Image (cartoon, rainbow, N blue to C red):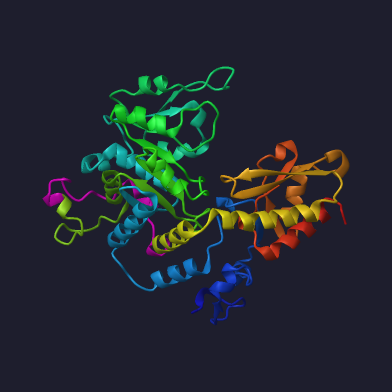
Amino acid sequence: MKPLKSCLPESGGSDTIRMLDLTAIAEGRQSMGVYDDLGVRTIINGAGSLTRLGGTRMEAPVLEAMAEAAASFVRIEDLQARAGEVIAEITGAEAGYVVTGAAAGLSLGMAAILAGLDVAKMDQLPDTTGLRNEVVVQRGHRNAYDHALRTAGIKFVEVGYLAYPGAGGTYGWQIDSAINERTAAVACPIIDTPGTVPLAEVAEIAHARGVPVIVDAAASLPPRANLRKFIAEGADLVAYSGGKAIRGPQASGVLAGRADLIASVALQHQDMDVRMATWRSRDLASKGLVAGIPHQGFGRAMKVGREEIVGLITALRRFAAGSDDADRAMYTARTDAIEAGLGSVAGIALSRSAGNGGVIPHLKITVDESVIGKSAYDILGELLDGDPAIALSETHAEFNIISVNPHGIDDSEVEIIIDRLRTVLGAR
């Protein structure tokens, strides 16, 4: 394979360009010298595909595709159109689009629902004065990430009760009764909150009232069946992260759904500094579908490069062609090895949880602070501050539980994690 040239000079000011082996980097066998040049420490990632840690490791074919894409120019609308066909084929949707992450997909999808193909409404966003701007959502589905939907200018109308089952949950009639002439959509993120109405029923209710459903499925892969499940259950738009299980670029995502909404996304996202005579999509105007070329739209700040589009599509194809069973076996082997390496350590209890549809098992380490003399937070801090730096999941650290998520771990890092954990836990 051809190596990719680093754009950073060697330390000490030399103009020599260092050559990096993409395959070695993807397999974790060669460190990224660019980080040494910048003075930034690399981290062994046992916490999962977290944005704050850079997402996931891209495989060599994805890196190669991105490097090749960077070497030539294309019309972005042509590339997005072809990418959309691939996404539609894989997800079962009418159309698809590559976005700069699931959050951008939600923002752009909401903008498309609000404006449709009305260029005046596109120009008005995120001011939603006079527009249908209410989005019905179940209280059990509210979360910090729905800020991406609010960015488009909508306001949520919450329905249902918390504290299921004692104080009830959400009922279909509550969703139905909240829909009125101001309702733009129903939001139904894929969050397993007991007592909430499932997507298929939400879609049936919403569609009976002529309202679309937008789904946040950012972290819903694997299993791979979820690539098609949510569209099949009636979602009008679904957003997935590209930089997690799919192993695409961190700043990438998949938006799949109705063709008319994806068309609006493209108009509000792509560079519209064009003239009608040369505009690739001028047939939209000649057919009377749009009044003219929309000005630089709501999504202009969320632009995606040709490298990310090609990288995401390459990664998506590879992911879709893969096997949940093969992945489960690989991640289980890594988790088994770490559990075996820690089994003799006093003051901890080990257990498993089935993450990501049971495909990625997590190892939970419950710390007895009276024996170890350290809290879970103390241990997490020592691991991050140590050499090498290791990040583990802090999701349940307030309960003195540390979790190891094997998704971002290379086989060569398993023994390093065991050794550092044993040291920090006082086992050697």
Residue 63 lies, with reference to residue 221, above or below; the image says below
**Image position of 169 (left or right of 282):** right
Q: Position of residue 379 (x, y in %)?
A: 77, 48
Q: Position of residue 301 (x, y in %)?
A: 38, 51
Q: Is residue 318 visible?
A: yes
Q: Position of residue 343 (x, y in %)?
A: 82, 51
Please give the name of the residue rendered at 78% of the width and 54% of the height, measured from the top-left corner: 340
**Image position of 180 (left or right of 277):** right
Seen as rendered, the residue at the extreme top is 167
Nearest to the observer: residue 359 or residue 173: 359
**Image position of 111 (left or right of 171):** left
Reply yes or no: does residue 98 show up in magenta. Answer: no
Q: Quadrant of residue 422?
A: bottom right
The quadrant the C terminus occupies is bottom right
Residue 38 lies, with reference to residue 220, above or below; the image says below
Reply yes or no: does residue 299 show up in magenta. Answer: yes
Nearest to the observer: residue 34 or residue 259: 259
Q: Position of residue 5 (x, y in %)?
A: 50, 77
Q: Quadrant of residue 329?
A: bottom right
Nearest to the observer: residue 85 or residue 330: 330
Seen as rendered, the residue at the extreme front is 325
Magenta segment range? 285-308
Please give the name of the residue rendered at 53% of the width and 57% of the height, measured from the top-left corner: 323
User: How many dots with numbers?
Assistant: 0
Please give the name of the residue rendered at 51% of the width and 78% of the height, measured from the top-left corner: 3
Q: Is residue 134 visible?
A: no
Residue 62 lies, with reference to residue 225, above or below; the image says below
Nearest to the observer: residue 303 or residue 266: 266
